[in-house]
Image (cartoon, coloured by chain):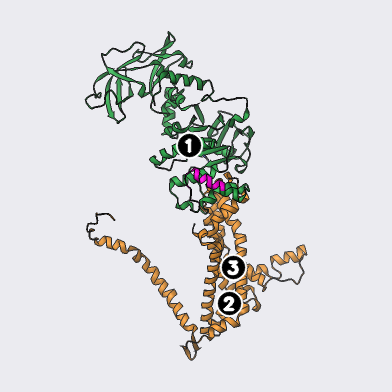
Amino acid sequence: MTAVVATPPRPSVLRRIARLAPYILLTPGLLWLLYFFIWPLAQMTLMSVSSGTLDTGFHVTGTLKSFSDALTKFGTQWGNSLLYGGTSTVLDFLIGFPVAYTIAFKGGRYKNLLLFMVIAPFFTSFLIRTISWQILLGDEGPILAFLKHTLGIVPVDFSILYSPVAVISGLTYNFLPFMILPMYVALEKIDFRLLEAAGDLYGSSWQTFRRVTFPLALPGVFAGSILTFIPAMGDYVNAELLGSPKTRMIGNVIQGRFLQSTDYPSASALSLLLMLGILIAVGIYARALGTEELTG
Amino acid sequence: MPILAATGRDRIARSEGGSGSGEEENPARVTDVAVRLVQLTKRFGGDTTGKRVATYVDGAKADDTFLAVDHIDLEVRDGEFFSLLGPSGCGKTTTLRMIGGFEQPTSGLIELKGEDVSWLPAYQRNVNTVFQNYALFPHLTVFENVAFGLRRRKVADADIKQRVGDMLELVELPGYERRKPGQLSGGQAQRVALARALVNKPAVLLLDEPLGALDLKLRKQMQVELKRIQQEVRITFIYVTHDQEEAMTMSDRIAVMNKGKYEQLGDPEVLYERPQTRFVAGFLGVSNLLRATPDGPVDGYAVYRLADATAVRVPQQLVQGESGPVAIGVRPEKIRLSEAKADVAPGLNRLAGVISDASYLGVSTQYIVSLAGGGSVTVYEQNVERATKSELWTAGESVQLTWVPEHSFVVADEGSASNAAQEDLS
Ligand SMILES: Nc1ncnc2c1ncn2[C@@H]1O[C@H](COP(=O)(O)OP(=O)(O)O)[C@@H](O)[C@H]1O
Ligand SMILES: [Mg+2]
């Protein structure tokens, strides 16, 4: 920079190691990713342009038939995935935000207890929780029995189970903690003096929320909805256990192709398209929320 | 800094008469008072939090509560730069937060321009705050930060643009509209915080140690700047600080707070020249305090005897009626040093001592002088008559200390009690 550019002292061995430290620390993670993500992804990509059967073996032929099938044959299931995944994400936000807000701002000394309650369901297996929703939503389950017989406000032959409502309910329930936790973290770290400043500048409680609290919580809302939407979109367990053939999602199709009809090329193409679709959806979403809001 | 005795006394007399800096004032007009605090009290903890009615009897201290602000009565005049000065933890911020509406008083009233606002939420008070850490909205641009208050009040867009622009000019940040707070330096963020509050033309602007996070040089610069801005906009400023020099530099009047109360209220020079309590004498500048007992009046002077029976005279009108032991105070720059055997003019207070330490400070030299009668005093001598090393007093030299009786002040000798108070703070 200045005239004093005398030869720098030769870096010692220790210093050279120190400079390499970030890469050394990254190595295990990178290897893990390489082996368990990049490698299978590459294989899957190759598989998606192959043809053959499990008996005769699969060969890369460069055919795009699997992709055109994936796009044309499963319109309903793609639609269901988008609809159910999207709806449950929105519902999770509507249910989760007030919860996160209350814990962050009004939780006081019960904060940790309340947070524990949010993640408590994780102590039971995903499958068992979903199966228990079969009972909850059953025709003679606690909810409907009460509405049908005690209150008598619902017709006796009314049913929720195996309908889209049941699948969305299950998805919403199962992914709710993924929505609440990031939003809680974002709300929790808001400096309360900013809220006082908004009040000082004539912002009513609502305006303060609208102009300060919520914008500052947006990174959490973004993270939460992605963490909810991605698994909900690709989920097949809820549709399997709480739905009917009509409510099948793309996850069910992929599962069927892999495990039942062993049509690996088709399953691979569907998986890749699902990934691509989610990436695009997230991209559009990030754009809509405004990247500046997310980084600022 | 040292003012001529006559001028000083004149000004003091006027201020003590309650007429401030001599502008026309009409005490009957309620609008002359920007903020009036009546018996304002805040007790933290216990079961009074959030309750509007005081359920405490004075003196009955509940174990788990803390009296942060203790029955303060105060009037802040319209358009003045008023400072709350005191050590950390004395209740300045709490007082300010109650005025701003962020903290509910345990008891007492807050009037803003004659209107009781004690129970109005912050957003309904015509008061704005410059927060200690600025509290700028990180997701909004400088423009939107400054425009925040105007937008909430539904000011027209064109107006907002105009006023925000003017305000950024006033704080010397034109062209910064589109920056985010994260891209500003401390001093710039400070100015934005000021602009954001001032643009609303509040009745009163509250500032909580707004310069605390800045380095010394910038702080000095901002002090001058703040004073200029205040004089330009003529809005009442209530300024909280623990830095006595800062308060003296900027304020029209200062209330010196200690333990939830204020001990003295007045112009900076009154507080400096005539502190009324040991605490004020010690908190503002350096004071030499000499314990003494009264020995009757002579020729309009009250005579006091120090421990070694040396007589010290103080003008009778400066004595506040203490009859027991007192502490006679004199500021270090008021004391003159001369050779032990030199003649001194009659009528001066005179003590004998030995120089025990001398530090050359450039503008002045600071001497610590051990008194013949025990104890020591600090003396500042301007480096005018004596400036070179050979001319300065050196340790071990015998000297006499003299000062004009009018430069003395008298405070009650709460001795141990007040010392304990100061130990609490450290
Ligand atoms: N929310 C609170 N709860 C309990 N005590 C508090 C609270 N806020 C302030 N205090 C106490 O009240 C006293 C005065 O605090 P503060 O007004 O912040 O002092 P200052 O601003 O003069 O440093 C301090 O002793 C502080 O510990
Ligand atoms: Mg404070």
Q: Amino acid at mark 3?
A: Arg
Give the foreground label among 1 and 2.
Answer: 1
**Cα distance between the residues tagged 1 and 2:** 69 Å
Q: Chain of mark 2?
A: A
Q: Tags 1 and 2 in contact by the CB under 8 Å rule?
A: no
Does the segment drawn in magenta span residue B168? yes
Q: Magenta residues, as a range?
A: B162-177
Q: Which residue is mark 2?
A: A250
Q: Position of residue B349 (x, y in %)?
A: 36, 14
Q: Amino acid at mark 2?
A: Ile
Task: Tell me whether marks 1 and 3 sit on the same chain.
Answer: no
Q: Chain of mark 1?
A: B
Is residue A125 visible in the rendered image? The answer is no
What color was chain B assigned in the picture? green
Label 1 crowd bin: few (<14), some (14–19), many (20+), radius 10 Å: some
**Cα distance between the residues tagged 2 and 3:** 22 Å
Check the image and name the residue furthest to the top: B299
**Cα distance between the residues tagged 1 and 3:** 68 Å
Q: Earlier in the sequence, mark 2 or mark 3?
A: 3
Q: Which chain is orange?
A: A
Give the foreground label among 1 and 3.
Answer: 1
Q: Nearer the viewer, residue A34 or B396?
A: B396
Q: Which residue is mark 3?
A: A129
Residue B114 found in image quarter: top right
Residue A253 found in image quarter: bottom right
Q: Position of residue A30 (x, y in %)?
A: 39, 70
Q: Amino acid at mark 1?
A: Arg
Image quarter where the C terminus of chain B lies is top left
Q: Nearer the viewer, residue B13 or A208?
A: B13
In this picture, residue B350 sits left or right of residue B33: left
Disc number placed over residue B228 in the picture, else none? 1
